[in-house]
Amino acid sequence: MSAYQIFEIASLTVLSAILILDLLLVIKRPHVPSMKESSAWVAVYVSLALVFAGVLFAMGDTQRSGEFLTGWLLEYSLSIDNLFVFIILLGSFAVPHALQQRVLMIGILIAIVLRGIFILVGVQVIESFAWVFYLFGAYLVYVAWKQAFGHDDEGGAPDNLVIRTLKRRLNFTDEWHGAKAVVRKDGVRFFTPFVLVILALGTVDLVFAIDSIPAIFSVTTDPFLVFACNIFALMGLRQLYFLLGGLLERLVYLHYGIAAILGFIGIKLVLHAMEANEVSWINGGEPITWVPHIETWHSLVVILVSMVVAVVASLWRMRSLDRTDATQADLRDDDHERVDV
């Protein structure tokens, strides 16, 4: 057994133990975490990701270390987009504060399972059909365009097709009954909003998995690294929800940063497909040698610059609006004082 295989087993064991511990804490202590607690957990998960990359680097595997770091930042930036939808869903279903951690944890576990399935299928497809990178790349460019200039996806709405169909066919209560999924009233079985919000989160997770898995394949096709990038990106998402909740709504340019990342990754996938071209009607089925090759560190720079520019621009706009509001408030106060005089 190679050192890398031992590292895989050890890492998966540690990650599984952390996820189980996190789940037990949510079940045993249902509460709304403070800013201090959320910050501490986010710092722990970020540190673990950096340690993971550092161990790979110390093992002399600099390529995999760089691929993991780039892939993790890519998935982390795309996962932040999930938070916008999570905020809408939890607000729309009026999830009690004490249950928000549990609901989010279940949603994240669903996301991990779905992405695990997508990774296994995706790796098999890529190994058999290299041309699929053309499709992945074109799809991500399309998603980037929708992200920047389109409208919000219906899939993230609380009353999507799945939810509406269930509401017509099953009995649901309007009120919450703690974490119970089913209650009985006069001998009739009713499902609670707990079931609806979990299904809504599962639908959203499916949509985001379809977007994020092709993106990570632009960085690496190593199944273990792809899965590790997703796990580390998702593990701190629940705490990030409580840490950034209100601020996310004010980061008005963040979707442009995410769109820039997706667009770049889509173009990178198409260029990669051209480099390894096997499609008979493109260049006679031969690889296209003149296309530029995008290195992993190029992707890392684009991801960091896109997110930093989007966040800084959003904060600058937010500060400008606050100043404008303060100025208008002062003018109104002056008008009132002159009227009183």
Image (cartoon, rainbow, N blue to C red):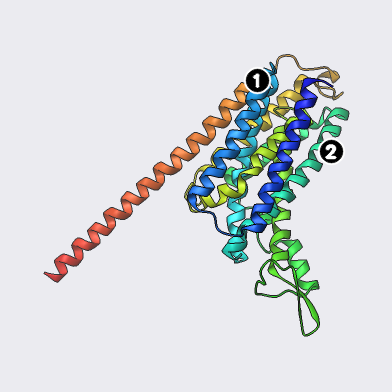
Left/right placement of residue 102 relative to residue 31 reads: right
Disc 1 marks a residue whose amino acid type is Phe
- Which residue appears farthest toward the bottom when viewing the image? 186
Foreground pick, 293 / 213: 213
Which residue occupies 71% across, 14% down? 290
Tell me if residue 34 comes above or below residue 310 in the rendering. Answer: below
Foreground pick, 308 / 66: 66
Count of number-bearing discs: 2
User: Could you say where residue 172 lies in the image, as x and y percent from the top left?
Assistant: 73, 74
Number of other residues with Cα within 10 Å of mark 1, as a class: few under 14, some 14 to 19, many 20 or more: some
Residue 336 visible in this rendered orientation of the protein: yes
CB under 8 Å between callouts 2 and 1? no
Q: Is mark 2 on a helix, strand or loop?
A: helix
- Which residue appears farthest toward the left when viewing the image? 341
Foreground pick, 54 / 175: 54
Residue 207 visible in this rendered orientation of the protein: no
> Which residue is labeled 1 in the image?
57
Left/right placement of residue 340 relative to residue 59 reads: left
User: Could you say where residue 186 lies in the image, as x and y percent from the top left?
Assistant: 77, 85
User: Could you say where residue 258 lies in the image, as x and y percent from the top left?
Assistant: 58, 39
Which residue occupies 63% across, 45% down? 146
Tell me if residue 64 comes above or below residue 139 in the rendering. Answer: above
Number of other residues with Cα within 10 Å of mark 2, as a class: few under 14, some 14 to 19, many 20 or more: few
Q: In which quarter of the image is the C terminus?
A: bottom left
> Which residue is labeled 2 in the image?
121
- For the residues marked 2 and 1, what is the alpha-carbon distance in whole angstroms? 28 Å
Foreground pick, 20 / 330: 20
> Counting residues from the N terminus, which is met first, the one under dot 2 or under dot 1?
1
Which residue occupies 83% across, 37% down? 120
Q: Is mark 1 on a helix, strand or loop?
A: helix
Disc 2 marks a residue whose amino acid type is Val
